[in-house]
Amino acid sequence: MVSITPTLKLLGGLRFDHFTAKYRDPVAGVGNDRSDNLWSPRIGALYQPNDVSSYYVSFGTSYNTSGDTYQFTPGSPTNRSFNTDPEKSRNFELGGKWELFDKRASLGVAAFYSEKYNERNTDPDFAATQELLSGKRHAAGMEFNLAGRINPKWEVFFNHTWIPEAKIDESNVPATTCNAMTGVCSPNGAQQKGDRPALTPRHSGSLWTTYRITPKLRVGGGLNYRGEQNPEGNRAVLADSFVTGDLMGNTPSPTCGRPSST
């Protein structure tokens, strides 16, 4: 971080990941392995006009390697992933944070644009042995976060993510699947170019609160919401929105003073 002025700072970062995965079948005497070296740069700017507000803009990259469960298994339908390079993503974000009510509460608002620009796709010519990094998808939306203390014992936390825009921009999934023997074609149920990506609800959020009953006992509870969404890989099914609830109890550990939760 470099301070240009007392209120303006520039930030930069560089992350390095070394990823290695191996799979061996001792009975068959076969296996697959892969190794990747990944660099992820990040840059941003921070503007702090006073001690109760700050504004920022940032850009960062990330990777998704090809080491998912069973993808290296010899003979499995997904073992073609072992020789496919990592997928790449980039994220742009613009936001602000404000301290409210004599700094008893903090409000954060951010707008983001995330893009995966070389998503794995099946190579139609070498489907059994190789995947292509030709897919592309994006999502754009806003995040709202509020955390505060109503009194010294009672705390409340709220967050809401709104993603009005999300789309598969490039994909080689065909609209129909045809039988080579009969020549009959039927609609393909898999997600295609132009669809909203799976597992991407327009609205999701949570509301959580905790209360310290005694110096050694704190209880809490919360609700988690996710809007309707398509399951992974299926454009014809729409899962309903749902809400889950959580409860917790927290007491200091008798050995080292750290909290333990149930």
Image (cartoon, rainbow, N blue to C red):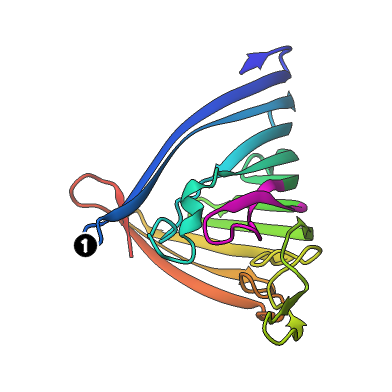
Q: Nearer the viewer, residue 241 or 26?
A: 26
> Which SS does the magenta portion mostly show?
strand
Please give the residue where the numbered disc 1 appears in the rendered image. Answer: 27
Q: In this view, does 91 lie to the left or right of 33?
A: right
Residue found farthest to the top: 4
Q: Position of residue 242 (x, y in %)?
A: 62, 78
Asked whether residue 24 is in view, the answer is no
Q: Position of residue 16 (x, y in %)?
A: 49, 29
Q: Position of residue 12 (x, y in %)?
A: 62, 22
**Range of the magenta residues?**
115-141
Disc 1 on helix, strand or loop?
Answer: loop
Q: In this view, does 253 lie to the left or right of 14?
A: left
- Give the residue at x 55% y 53%: 130
- Give the residue at x 58% y 61%: 127
- Assess disc 1: are there few (<14), some (14-19) or many (≥20) residues with their C-alpha within 10 Å of its C-alpha: few
Q: Which of 76 and 262 is in front in this view?
A: 76
- Give the residue at x 59% y 53%: 131
Name the quarter where the N terminus is drawn: top right
Q: Is residue 194 left or right of residue 105?
A: right
